[in-house]
Amino acid sequence: MEYIIKHKIIQKSLVFIYLFLSSVLYAENVNSLLQKYNKMNALSQKTIDENKGHLVLFSREKLESMHAKTLKDVFKTTPIVYYHENRYGLPDPLSGGLFEPYRSNFIRLYVDGVEITQGWMGSGLMLYGDVNIDFVDHIEFYYMIPSFETSVEPAYITIFLYSKDPKRDNGGKLSFIDGSRGYNSQNINYGEQKEDFSYMINFSHTNSKREKIDNGTDKPLSRDFERTQLFSYIKTEDQIFHLQVMKKETDSLAGLSLDATPLISEIDYLNIHMDYGINFSEHWRIQFAYDWLKTDLKEKDDVPLVFFGNTFGNSFDAMSKNSTYTSELTYKNKIGNNHIATGIKGRIKKLDTVNVEGYGIIPLTFNTESFASFFFQDQYALTEHQLLTFGVEYNKIYRNSNIKNDFLLQLRLGYIFTNENWTYKTYLYRLMFSLDPFNRYIDSLNFKEAIHQTTIGLTQEVSYRDDTQRIRLFVHMMQDEDSLLQNNTNSLGGDTKYITAIFNYDYNFNMNNKMNLQLYYARYEDIFNLDKLEDYSGYLSFSNSYEKFDFYNGVVWHQNSINNKNYFDLTSSVSLNVNENLTLTLKGQNLLDKAKETSMFRVDPATGNMLAPLEISPIDRRITLELEYLF
């Protein structure tokens, strides 16, 4: 009897242990499946086309581990082109530090596949370079020549922000941030999936109190700004409509002051973007976009201002409005082994009005630029793992008044090999760029002729990926003919040559502990006002999770041959996940106060001689505390 009782106890114990282990294994299996699903969803494999170019991806998981709140937080870690701000306090990665209005029109910005542009003023990066990204699911940076399917105008870099989807992010999120010097930000995001449509609304407000810049006077330079931002969309299976509004009131740093000692330097912006797209058949898509920008500029100095001093003297108080209209018609089809994409695109940029205080509405002669593009692209599948791609795009630019038109031709030939672990990619390309309308407008007497740059380049990329690691090497050689990135006043530049190399190594120790390493080298000849420039940089980050805590530590390193100085931008954060709905995050950026600096050049108004430039870091040293609540 005792034996039977013991035997039954042992049987029940074995059954309990079996059921317990089964439930644990089942839970782990379910968690594993969920992790795999989340990873695939975060990477948004459907949107990542190898033929778009050379990709630097910031997945949903990566953005959340970095606690990236603005595009600036992401851009400062990228290779080749770094985050800079110009003398007007605007995001301008290609800024040369001189008095040019805006340099970074070679960088194009897209939200859900639709370009944001300030039209007459240039690339949408001008206002959206530090945009709040709480509405963003993931970000893709494509380097060098982009796929012709996406670009209305040619670009060195295309940045794609993809918004969150209510299928994953149904419900809302509140975020409150307070930081150093009175910095504060508030954000609300809400999305919902209905039976036939989905929608999302994101509203944010940022009051950015930033570090002041000593200019040798008792009135240091200010770049504080206050931004109110609305992002929204409504979409069905085959249609989507976006509405975005941004109001930004800024202290514009040195502004139009020759020696960077302005008495007043303020620029306020109001930007509206709307777009509508529809897939009206399996192969055809049409898309329309409208961008409108109002700019209020107030500048005053004790000497004549840059650009406007000859006409308006020491002060300039003006309001301008410009509008941009974009339309696209594309056709895609698979014919045998050929994946064909072709279409026509058009863009009209209008400087609607310029009103100067004390002078009234200024008569405009050159105020319209029209951009027409036709593209054809074929992706031919040589085998299951090999792709040969060829693309051609023809652009014609029409201008009114006596400003000559431009004819541009873009070409791209590429080869791609992929299998489960390896990827090889190479492109040979030719790009042409034209001088933007705003630069022509402010100096139309000298820029009447057709002014364009021709770029020829070759890229090579090889990468390996398995379950725990990813290794990539990217090498790029390029030459600009008649470069627009040189500081030769009122004339075309010479030839600028580039050689760049990027090495990436990402390693997942396990699900909760990950490392990312990036090393970068570049050599430039005849860029800006330099004969030669060598540049080195690196980025190393660790993200770790332990019970209810998440940790992130990342450092960006820069060095160049101008001063051989080492710059380090250390960002660290720790998050406490109080429960599944509430998270508290303490974050510090530029903790060492040694982030990369931008040179801002100055001129002595009395003698015309160059003064020592101001070295200004676009990355503030700041501590923030964030409360995030899901509902």
Image: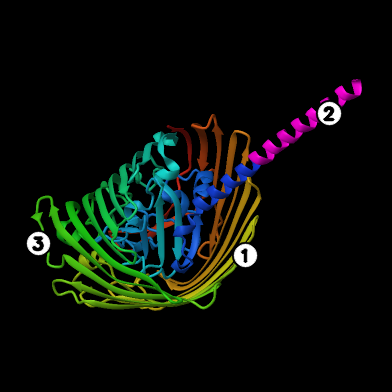
Q: Is residue 586 magenta?
A: no
- In-front residue for pair 33/244: 33
What's the residue type where badge 3 is placed? Answer: Pro
- Residue corresponding to mark 1: 421
Q: Nearer the viewer, mark 1 or mark 3?
A: 1
Q: Residues within 10 Å of mark 1 (few under 14, many from 20)?
A: few
Q: What residue type is labelled 1?
A: Asn
Residue on which the image places disc 2? 10
Picture residue at 46% right of the left edge, 49% below the top: 73
Q: Give the range drawn in magenta.
A: 1-27
- Residue 406, image x, y percentages: 25, 77
According to the picture, the residue beneath numbered tag 3 turns out to be 363
Residue 511: % across, % down: 63, 46
Examine the residues drawn in magenta and state their main secondary structure: helix
Percent x, y of residue 19: 71, 34
* Contact check, label 2 and label 3, Cβ < 8 Å: no
Find numbered disc 1 in the image and state the secondary structure of the residue it sits on. Answer: loop
How many angstroms separate mark 2 from mark 1 (CA)? 48 Å
Name the amino acid, label 2.
Ile
Q: Earlier in the sequence, mark 2 or mark 1?
A: 2
Viewport quadrant of the N terminus: top right
Tell me: residue 516, above or below residue 382.
above
Q: How far apart are labels 1 and 3 at the CA level?
A: 61 Å
Element type where label 3 sits in the image: loop
Q: In which quarter of the image is residue 386?
A: bottom right
- Please provide percent x and percent y for residue 354: 14, 56
Q: How far apart are marks 2 and 3 (CA)?
A: 97 Å
Quadrant housing residue 567: bottom right
Q: Is residue 25 a member of the stretch shown in magenta? A: yes
* SS of the residue under disc 2: helix
